[in-house]
């Protein structure tokens, strides 16, 4: 069975570069996710940061020598072909003479070839190991080395050449950013979100999520946009284990499910707790699903613990002492049950039948008249020279003005309350799309004709609608990536599937437009130089390219109005100093259609009528 490996490197305190704030946290968070949530073994997830503990007698301090030695040792002694490897690096990267280098903690920009890790050699060695590798590079570009504008370009070409799945945090001409408020780099934060929300099951899914979420985080924290680059040899390639425990159970392929369960549960408590285990299984399934586990537990409760000499003797003694009492006990119980059954039948007959006394004359045979009503033959008994017929009790007929009330179906609100109640029984949250999807999957396992099937089908419809509602609310908040991720949980067999697919297409287009408009606003912000009215005017002209009604247009309008107010303030400040001509010229830069335009025109008219100072 293939093993799962991970190497997470994060460097904060560089010796020759400006320190980073979140690289170490990025590496630690990814490693923790793979161990805690993805099921990777702790000893096969290796962390290398400024403060990571040693591995035995080996240092994990992220120097070039330590990183390369670790890779060599793993390739020689641990890795097997087809093993899965996650290689994650968060730190600086530099392109030198057309080659990309990862910068370890002691890397010196004056001696890149000697102190940096050549990315080509690294990726070629991973390919030779014949691993199922995923490379994640959250590479920062030092602002002091802006001449090296193509960092990541060779990495893209190498990934395509060597057919290694690779995701890079930004385009070669962009910068990667981090936020101390967020606690991570924007790229790594988006990766973690995708994996935890189930949107990173395949590289294709992960690419879609990152392409929307990373720019969204940049915009939210007021940073220039960065767009990740993804190289995917196989678009449906899975990147996480199919089972989180596939590598934890050894040598169990020949065991039956009963034997595996026996090995997992403590022997002394089997007989006393088997009924409790079955009850817990039913409670967990919630919506009526009782899987194969219940059968396994009921069968398992009949197993005996390993016998010892004392245990066998005690069992024989108990059997001998109870051999006489068992028949008596069963006879007594059976007798009581028979007496109780007879009493129930007698009482029901007394309540369910009535007697009608009829004179002998009334029992004569009716004439063969066509209008004579033919009555059913009923039991008769003799009482005081009269015949008594036993008639079944019949409910009184409905009067003409009485109508039998129809069965009132549950209202939509009652159905929704029942669906919410069933969610609560499964400890699932109604405001989490992934929880609703899990509940739907459980409800689908209830077979037609079984108890709870109709309610399960009603719940599925309601939960599917709740998922789409959550997605729509996220889209309204400009959270397009999470909106699309939620809507994609609605399957083809749901009535609202076409509506969800149409919404997904719309939100993806809006997301692209939102990213484009956000980039325009970033460019407009970059033009501004405080105190210079003309730069605010140019920024307004750029922001006007965001058309009204488009995603991000509300933010563009706010920025335009704010900048127009700043221009007017600069003009009024100059007027207060007696610089009338400069004030008029400045106020003239306030564009028409902005919030400050009318006030600027009034100020210009006032200043033009002002008498010049002597």
Image (cartoon, rainbow, N blue to C red):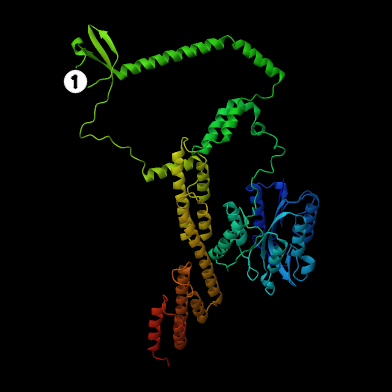
Q: Nearer the viewer, residue 288 or 453?
A: 453
Q: Nearer the viewer, residue 18 or 337?
A: 337
**Quarter of the image that includes the N terminus:** top right
Q: Quadrant of residue 298?
A: top right
User: x and y percent of residue 472 in the render?
Assistant: 46, 57
Query: For mark 1, what is the residue?
Result: 369
Residue in view at x 53 percent, y 10 percent: 328
Q: Among all residues in the image, which is located at the extreme bottom? A: 614
User: x and y percent of residue 116 in the render?
Assistant: 76, 65
Residue in view at x 55 percent, y 77 percent: 527
Q: Nearer the viewer, residue 165 or 418?
A: 165
Compared across the picture, whether 57 is left or right of 261 comes to: right
User: x and y percent of residue 253 in the render?
Assistant: 70, 38
Compared across the picture, whether 614 is left or right of 154 comes to: left
Compared across the picture, whether 360 is left or right of 219 comes to: left
- Total labels drawn: 1
237 relative to 268, above or below: below
Q: Quadrant of residue 414?
A: top left
Q: Among all residues in the image, which is located at the extreme top? A: 385
């Amino acid at each position: 069975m293939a093993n799962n490996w991970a190497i997470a490197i994060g460097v904060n305190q560089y010796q020759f570069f400006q320190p980073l704030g979140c690289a170490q946290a990025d590496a630690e968070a990814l490693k923790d996710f793979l161990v805690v949530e993805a099921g990777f073994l702790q000893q096969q997830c290796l962390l290398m940061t400024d403060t990571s503990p040693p591995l035995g007698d080996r240092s994990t301090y992220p120097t070039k020598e330590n990183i390369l030695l670790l890779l060599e040792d793993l390739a020689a002694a641990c890795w097997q072909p087809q093993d899965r490897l996650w290689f994650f690096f968060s730190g600086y990267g530099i392109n030198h003479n057309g080659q990309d280098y990862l910068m370890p903690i002691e890397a010196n920009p004056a001696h890149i070839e000697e102190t940096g890790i050549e990315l080509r050699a690294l990726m070629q060695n991973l390919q030779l190991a014949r691993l199922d590798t995923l490379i994640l590079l959250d590479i920062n570009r030092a602002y002091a080395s802006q001449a090296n504008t193509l960092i990541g370009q060779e990495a893209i070409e190498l990934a395509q050449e060597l057919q290694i799945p690779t995701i890079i945090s930004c385009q070669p001409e962009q910068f990667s950013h981090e936020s101390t408020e967020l606690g991570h780099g924007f790229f790594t934060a988006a990766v973690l979100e995708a994996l935890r929300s189930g949107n990173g099951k395949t590289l294709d899914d992960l690419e879609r999520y990152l392409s929307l979420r990373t720019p969204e985080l940049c915009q939210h924290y007021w940073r220039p946009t960065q767009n990740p680059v993804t190289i995917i040899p196989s678009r449906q390639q899975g990147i996480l284990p199919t089972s989180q425990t596939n590598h934890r159970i050894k040598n169990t392929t020949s065991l039956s499910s009963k034997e595996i369960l026996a090995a997992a549960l403590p022997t002394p408590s089997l007989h006393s707790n088997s009924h409790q285990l079955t009850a817990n299984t039913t409670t967990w399934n919630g919506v009526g699903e009782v899987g194969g586990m219940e059968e396994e537990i009921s069968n398992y409760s009949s197993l005996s613990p390993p016998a010892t000499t004392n245990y066998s003797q005690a069992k024989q003694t108990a059997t001998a002492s109870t051999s006489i009492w068992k028949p008596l006990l069963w006879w007594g119980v059976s007798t009581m049950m028979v007496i109780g059954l007879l009493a129930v039948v007698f009482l029901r007959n007394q309540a369910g039948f009535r007697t009608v006394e009829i004179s002998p004359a009334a029992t004569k045979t009716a004439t063969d008249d066509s209008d004579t009503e033919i009555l059913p033959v009923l039991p008769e008994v003799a009482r005081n020279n009269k015949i008594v017929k036993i008639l079944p009790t019949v409910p009184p007929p409905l009067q003409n003005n009485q109508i039998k009330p129809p069965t009132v179906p549950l209202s939509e609100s009652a159905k929704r309350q029942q669906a919410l109640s069933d969610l609560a029984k499964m400890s699932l949250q109604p405001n989490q799309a992934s929880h609703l999807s899990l509940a739907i999957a459980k409800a689908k396992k209830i077979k037609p004709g079984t108890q709870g099937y109709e309610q399960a089908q009603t719940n599925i419809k309601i939960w599917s609608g709740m998922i789409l509602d959550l997605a729509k609310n996220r889209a309204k908040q400009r959270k397009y990536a999470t909106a699309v991720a939620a809507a994609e949980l609605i399957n083809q067999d749901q009535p609202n599937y076409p509506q969800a697919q149409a919404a997904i297409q719309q939100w993806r287009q809006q997301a692209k437009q939102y990213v484009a408009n956000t980039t325009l606003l970033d460019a407009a912000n970059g033009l501004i130089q405080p105190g210079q009215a003309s730069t605010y005017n140019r920024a307004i002209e750029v922001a006007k390219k965001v058309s009204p009604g488009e995603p991000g247009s509300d933010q563009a309008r706010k920025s335009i109005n704010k900048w127009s107010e700043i221009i007017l303030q600069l003009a009024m400040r100059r007027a207060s100093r007696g610089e009338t001509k400069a004030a008029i010229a400045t106020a003239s830069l306030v564009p028409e259609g902005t919030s400050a335009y009318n006030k600027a025109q009034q100020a210009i008219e006032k200043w033009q009528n002002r008498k010049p100072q002597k």
